[in-house]
Image (cartoon, rainbow, N blue to C red):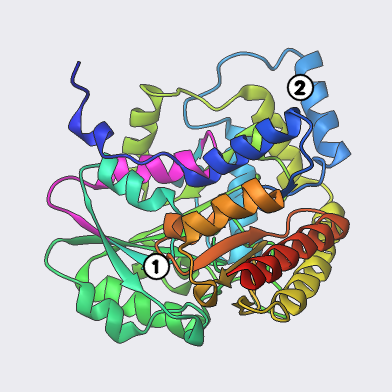
Amino acid sequence: MKIAGRIAQVKPSLTLAITQKAKSMKAEGVDVVGFGAGEPDFDTPLHIKEAAKRAIDRGATKYTPASGTPELKRAICEKFERENGIKYVPEEIITSCGAKHSLYNIFQVICEKPDEVLIISPYWLSYPEMVHLAEGKPVFVTTDEKNAFVPSIDDINRKITQATKAIILNSPSNPTGSVLDRDFLEKIAEIAVAKKIFVISDEIYENLLYDGEKRISIASLGEKIKALSFTVNGVSKSYSMTGWRIGYLGGPKEIVSHMSAFQSHSTSNPASISQAAALDALKGSQAEVKEMKKAFVERRDYMVERINKIKGLSCVKPKGAFYLFCNIALTGLDSVALCDKLLEEAKVACVPGIAFGSDKYIRLSFATSIANIKKGLDRIENWLNNAKNNS
């Protein structure tokens, strides 16, 4: 039986595959240290869980408007103005089943053949697949760790063609932890406005910025760029609510209305109970968010220092998110081979960099305890030393 061509070319998520394999090994009693996690290891804050329970008790378990409850959309508008300096109205907001769903909606609504979408590489692995599913063409702008994985404006300009429909920005970045500064964003805004290119700004890790880095949303830089921008966010990473599946975006009113119509025929509304929890997350105490950030800083600093002392490995210090993109070129192995060996022989789960567009790296998540980080890095160091001695 033949399946649709647009589906046949989609690659399965390597991060989910490795996470599932590690979980299966753990279920069999194998002591696996997981560095593959794309989610905080903290529990959802209690006040958010209590808000969900209250929603159940009062019967808020029915359909809501497809694009989200009015209360949540107003809270999102307030959040965008308060924290990002962007003034949206509820008609410019859509709530979806996770930030991934919000991104998927964007591509489905704005892309078609022969549209091209610029993607900064290394990239989050779902971006190219989403573009393919919308029958667009991913065009990659490569970066180097010498420049903290931030591309040059010249490199971006060289990739722009008449078919360029949009550029994706992810700051802080998954997998590199790079952060785009105001000067860079202002130059991108100038290009986008001059060439009428959409900017898709994935800001899901915005609350996990370190070393004094400031959040800057490109849509806050003026009305002209705001009219071409989609500001994507959600509650998953900041509030440890990955399983609740609530994402949202702000964007041009007319296009958002088409996204709402599209969503009404796919998922309909996000879960009503999760929306009530997200409302409390945005409007309630942010104390737990700050505590999580402190823990991530401690873990990051330990992991960076330790990795750079292990022969064969190196890394730059990420400025945000909770990932470390580790250079493995000196090991002589590609990223898939190294990750397979680390999982099978060292019992450590990492994600191959090829999934993010760079085969000489692996991604390590520090969304796990210091104790696990120490144990996992001990195992990696021992395995590399043994491999070198046996070669």
Boundaries of the magenta span: 96-117
Q: Residue at x 79, y 64 (%)?
A: 378
Q: Which mark is residue 121?
A: 1
The amino acid marked with disc number 1 is Ser
Front in this rendered view, residue 198 or 32 = 32
Instruction: Bin the neighbour count of mark 2 within 10 Å (Cα to Cα): few under 14, some 14-19, many 20 and up.
Output: some
Q: Is residue 193 left or right of residue 38?
A: left
189 versus 99 height, above or below: below
Residue 203: within the magenta? no
Front in this rendered view, residue 115 or 29 = 29
Front in this rendered view, residue 330 or 66 = 330
Q: Is residue 166 left or right of residue 25?
A: left
Q: Position of residue 221 (x, y in %)?
A: 46, 74
245 versus 303 height, above or below: above
Q: Earlier in the sequence, mark 2 or mark 1?
A: 2
Q: Secondary structure at mark 1?
A: strand
Q: Residue at x 88, y 57 (%)?
A: 371
- Location of the N terminus (image quadrant): top left
| Image quadrant assignment for residue 130 | top left
Q: Is residue 173 left or right of residue 28?
A: left
| Image quadrant assignment for residue 357 | bottom left
Visible in this render: residue 91? no
Q: Which residue is mark 2?
A: 55
Q: Position of residue 94 (x, y in %)?
A: 48, 40
Q: Which mark is residue 225?
A: none
Q: How far separated are the C-alphas under marks 2 and 1?
A: 42 Å
Q: Is residue 108 left or right of residue 113?
A: right
The amino acid marked with disc number 2 is Ala
Q: Secondary structure at mark 2?
A: helix
Q: Position of residue 336 (x, y in %)?
A: 48, 55
Q: Position of residue 215 (x, y in %)?
A: 61, 71
Residue 111: within the magenta? yes
